[in-house]
Amino acid sequence: MPKSKVRKKVKEQNHIDQLVEQQEHAHQLAESPKWLAPTMVAAFLAGLIWIVIFYVSGTSYPVPHIGAWNMLIGFGFIGAGFTLATRWR
């Protein structure tokens, strides 16, 4: 039995509505939060400054008495920056 033209139009309209909803949802996901980029840059700079201070001070600052662990802290800040960079759109 042949299908009516009304059914075809309704089916096509439903398909178009689904596509519009998917595009709107994709657009919402495509935007980064406003805080992400400044926080990412701040983490990179904090790690860089931490490591530079460690080397310039002759390995006695920014936190005295922990020695080479200062390097780990600096690279931790940089790692946090890279982690945030993966979420940036």
Image (cartoon, rainbow, N blue to C red):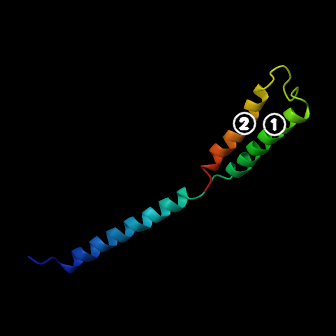
Can you identify the residue that label 2 sits on? 75
Q: How many labels does the image show?
A: 2
Task: Give the x, y percent position of residue 44.
Answer: 75, 44
Can you identify the residue that label 1 sits on? 51
Q: Verify CB contact (< 8 Å) between mark 2 and mark 1.
A: yes
- The furthest residue to the left: 1
Which residue is at 80% across, 42% downward?
48
Foreground residue among 63 and 10 = 63
Which residue is at 74% across, 42% downward?
43
Question: What mark, if any, has residue 59 been given in the picture?
Answer: none
Which residue is at 48% across, 59% downward?
25
Q: Which amino acid does label 2 sit on?
A: Phe
Foreground residue among 64 and 12 = 64
Quarter of the N terminus within the rendering: bottom left
Secondary structure at numbered mark 1: helix
Please tell me whether residue 29 is drawn above or below residue 45 in the rendered image. Answer: below
